[in-house]
Image (cartoon, rainbow, N blue to C red):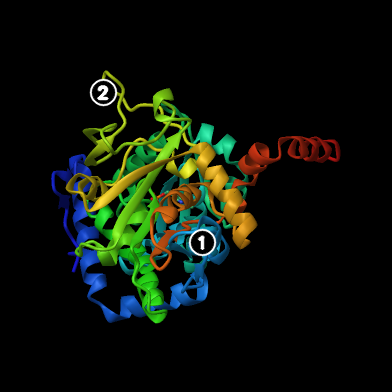
């Protein structure tokens, strides 16, 4: 079994924070371990997963796509059917229940594209917690619909106007808040990164995705040859892979954002030699850095993969070889999104479409009795403003101008 609390993964991970945050992180580590040994906590978690998230999510046999490609059978874990549309809710629910157990009345979170902010705001609404979400001003403008949803759930969305005014700056602001407020506030980090114990804790809360998938495969008598997930910070991938980390099979494949192509520099691929080891925002891992060691600008058509750092455990599993890394470019992700919509009636989130693209590449190389499973970490409704502009630009432009004229 994967150990629940690791702190370090090879040379990666750790807890590189200001002195003032050591106490709250110790407290969190203690409570996280205690909660996981407490049947009452698991009963609460089960109830919220069942009634609020809508678990278990289905496992779909993508028959038409598999037949068309003429290779392995592709199965899709439809994590995007969870409430709020993505896997992020699994972690938000787990940490919010932990916050309640610790007697906190307030939750703070950072968000980039807004998906983690939406999940956190929704959970805080149902559990009666006060919620503040830090969001870079640039992201707030780009992702206006998600700000609307967060506010509707009753959260306060605070614009961050320092630095590049994006996710990294929102994390700094949330850490600053927490250093002054931890007595009654929990900081709910959105991916499997940050200072220990967050990478371990987020993996454990996301492992429900992998365990359900393992059980659903077993019910159908299937043994997977490969599992494929997209990798931003790494939470959907590490949760999906978790039951298999200690065994040699199946192949575990993480897919990073190839953006406009590695040679253009406009990408977010940190593995396969592109990232450098560094320490940022409390943890040691692989980061995309510029020549002079500054955090580099990244690009992906999917906001959730557009991030310079990768979770420490995945960085380690990449170096050890247990997890293989691949890349999918913006155009490949859009193509996969279109293929699965037409063939299967399922619209992938742009992030998850990177994993779908890798599956479409791998399937024809494998025999037709082998099975590969793709994690559809989210559904694509949230991406309408990007997808429609890319795939049907004229119709979309007409729609927008008619909408504006009608105001
Ligand atoms: C945020 C997000 C991701 C990327 O985050 P990970 O921590 O790497 O999982 C992937 N897919 C969706 C749908 C997301 O919202």
Q: Is residue 347 above or below residue 34?
A: above
Q: Which residue is mark 1?
A: 66
Answer few, some or many: residues within 10 Å of disc 1's Cα (few below 14, many 20 plus, some between 14 and 19): many
Residue placed at 26% from the left, 18% from the top?
292
Assess mark 1: CB under 8 A from ligand 1? no
Camera-side residue of 81 and 193: 81
Camera-side residue of 44 and 186: 44
Tell me the tag on residue 293.
2
Assess mark 2: CB under 8 A from ligand 1? no
The quadrant the N terminus occupies is bottom left
Camera-side residue of 360 and 213: 360
Q: Is residue 161 above or below residue 187?
A: above
Name of the residue lying farthest toward the right? 406
Residue 374, picture quadrant: bottom left
Disc nearest the viewer among 1 and 2: 1
Answer few, some or many: residues within 10 Å of disc 2's Cα (few below 14, many 20 plus, some between 14 and 19): few
């Amino acid at each position: 079994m994967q150990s629940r609390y690791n702190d370090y993964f090879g040379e990666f991970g750790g807890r590189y924070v200001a002195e003032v945050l050591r106490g709250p992180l110790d407290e969190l580590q203690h409570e996280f371990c205690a909660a996981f040994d407490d049947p009452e906590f698991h009963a609460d978690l089960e109830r919220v997963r069942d009634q609020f998230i809508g678990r278990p999510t289905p496992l779909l046999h993508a028959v038409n796509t598999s037949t068309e490609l003429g290779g392995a059978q592709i199965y899709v874990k439809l994590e995007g059917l969870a409430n709020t549309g993505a896997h992020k809710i699994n972690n938000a629910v787990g940490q919010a229940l932990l916050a309640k157990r610790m007697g906190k009345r307030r939750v703070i979170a950072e968000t980039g594209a807004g998906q983690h902010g939406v999940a956190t705001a929704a959970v805080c609404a149902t559990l009666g917690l006060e919620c503040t979400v830090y969001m870079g001003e640039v992201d707030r403008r780009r992702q206006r619909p998600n700000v609307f949803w967060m506010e509707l759930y009753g959260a306060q969305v605070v614009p961050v106007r320092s630095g590049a005014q994006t996710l990294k700056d929102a994390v700094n602001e949330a850490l600053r808040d927490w250093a002054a407020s931890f007595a009654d506030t929990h900081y709910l980090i959105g991916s499997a990164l940050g200072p220990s114990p967050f990478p371990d804790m987020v993996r454990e809360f996301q492992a429900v995705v992998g365990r359900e998938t393992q059980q659903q495969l077993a019910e159908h008598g299937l043994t997977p040859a490969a599992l494929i997930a997209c990798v931003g910070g790494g939470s959907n991938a590490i949760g999906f892979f978790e039951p298999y980390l200690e065994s040699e099979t199946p192949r575990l494949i993480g897919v990073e954002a190839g953006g406009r192509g590695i040679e253009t520099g406009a990408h977010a691929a940190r593995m396969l030699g592109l990232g450098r080891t560094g320490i940022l925002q409390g943890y040691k891992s692989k980061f995309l850095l510029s020549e002079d060691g500054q955090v580099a600008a990244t690009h992906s058509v999917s906001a959730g993969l557009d991030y310079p750092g990768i979770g420490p455990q995945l960085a380690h599993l990449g170096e050890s070889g247990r997890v293989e890394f691949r890349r999918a470019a913006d155009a490949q992700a859009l193509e996969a999104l279109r293929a699965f919509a037409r063939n299967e009636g399922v619209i992938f989130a742009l992030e998850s479409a990177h994993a779908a693209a890798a599956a479409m590449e791998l399937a024809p190389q494998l025999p037709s009795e082998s099975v590969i499973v793709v994690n559809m970490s989210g559904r694509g409704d949230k991406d309408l403003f990007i997808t429609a502009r890319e795939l049907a630009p004229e119709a979309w432009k007409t729609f927008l101008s008619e909408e504006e004229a009608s105001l």
